[in-house]
Image (cartoon, grey):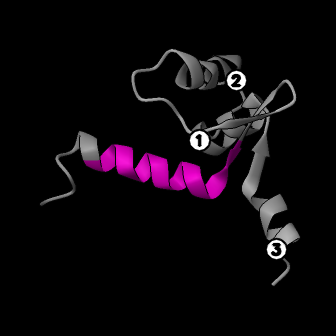
Amino acid sequence: MNTENSLDDDVLIGARAIAYFLFGSTEYRFQRRIYYLTTTAKIKMPHFRLGQQLAARKSILRAWTGDHALQKHGGGNP
């Protein structure tokens, strides 16, 4: 397994790419939501910066959205 290729496939660069991954749309309102989630939100989205651009790993966002959904719905207990 080539670690560099797997990392390239896992990294999202820019609010547009992150918005498309999380919301399935690149509309401006979803891009603004990404900025909100990284700055003002009570529960901040995991991210990092590459220069001036936001970046995030798909694997970490999947885990974060799963954890957030479990907390919202009572820990995942039926």
Q: Within the magenta stretch, is there residue 39?
A: no
Local SS, label 2? loop
Point out which mark residue 27 bears. 2
Q: For residue 27, which quarter of the picture?
A: top right
Per the model, the C-alpha gap separating discs 3 and 1 is 24 Å
> Is the residue marked by circle 3 packed among few (<14), some (14-19), or many (20+) residues within 10 Å?
few
Residue at 14 percent of width and 59 percent of height? 77
Point out which mark residue 14 bears. none
* Residue 62, percent from left and from top: 53, 54
Q: For residue 32, which quarter of the picture?
A: top right
Closer to the eye: label 3 or 1: 3
Residue at 46 percent of width and 20 percent of height? 41
Q: For residue 48, which quarter of the picture?
A: top right
Rendered view: 41 above or below 2: above
Closer to the N terminus: mark 3 or mark 1? 3
Mark 1, residue position: 22
Which amino acid is tagged 3?
Answer: Thr
Mark 3, residue position: 3
Question: Which residue is more in the foreground, 37 or 48?
Answer: 48
Q: Is residue 50 left or right of residue 38?
A: right
Residue at 84 percent of width and 59 percent of height? 8
| Segment colored magenta | 56-70
Q: Is residue 70 left or right of residue 55?
A: left
Residue at 79 percent of width and 69 percent of height? 6
Q: Is residue 70 left or right of residue 16?
A: left
Rendered view: 67 above or below 53: below
Per the model, the C-alpha gap separating discs 1 and 2 is 12 Å
Which amino acid is tagged 2?
Answer: Glu
